Amino acid sequence: MAVKIRLVRLGKIRTPHYRIVVADSRKARNGLKIEEIGRYSPASEPSLIHVDSDRAQHWLKNGAQPTPAVEAILKVTGDWQKFKGLPGAEGTLKTLPPRADKRAAYEAAVKAAMNEPKDGATTMKKRAAEKLAAKGAPAEEAPVDSVVEAPADVLAETPAESVVESAPEAAAETATETAAEQ
């Protein structure tokens, strides 16, 4: 039986993922396989390559022939050099840097949020409720500091009582004049 180590294609259009399998060369590409020995995903940067080195060495020693694509992958991982006795058995496989621990990042964010003072609403619903409460609340009187004072000589000329009394009288006079004109 002619045994080959080859790739079985998986994935969607334009996003391939491959499994490195040992199969009979007379079977279809995605047909019956003897054993799966690894995975290859070229879409990520750097490419994801995972090969079970012990099983690859076993099949190479027992006469399985790798396809050119699998041979290139085995050279990257160093398994081909190890099988042939060539230098460079460590391979040139690039690995992804370790990802940040999501749980640690979440706990740090929670700790930072606990230390911050609660100033204002945190959700849209609460913000809307605060705006509605602000509209419904009566307007506050202006603080005393912001009132502009008139010069003392102007205040001496017009007493405050006459200004207060003259305003309603003037409004009443204009109302009677407009009624008479009609």
Image (cartoon, rainbow, N blue to C red):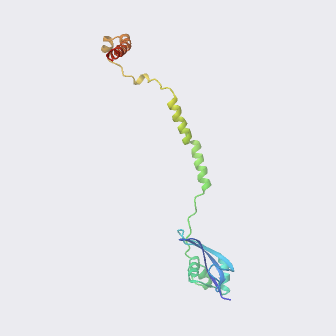
**Viewer-closest of 159 and 145:** 159
Residue 23 horizontal side relative to residue 148, left or right:
right
Above/below status of 107 relative to 159:
below
Quadrant of residue 56 within the rendered picture = bottom right
Number of numbered discs overlaid on the protein picture: 0
Residue visible at 53% across and 32% down in the picture: 133
**Viewer-closest of 108 and 12:** 12
Quadrant of the image for the N terminus? bottom right
Above/below status of 59 relative to 48:
below
The percent coordinates of residue 173 (x first, y second) are 34, 13
Q: Residue furthest bottom?
A: 1
**Viewer-closest of 26 and 152:** 26
Above/below status of 153 relative to 45:
above
Quadrant of the image for the C terminus? top left
Q: Residue furthest front?
A: 182
Residue 158 horizontal side relative to residue 27, left or right:
left
Residue visible at 63% across and 75% down in the picture: 38
Residue 99 appears in view: yes
Residue 120 appears in view: no
Quadrant of residue 3 within the rendered picture = bottom right
The percent coordinates of residue 108 (x first, y second) are 59, 50
Residue visible at 57% across and 42% down in the picture: 115
The percent coordinates of residue 109 (x first, y second) are 58, 49
Above/below status of 69 relative to 155:
below
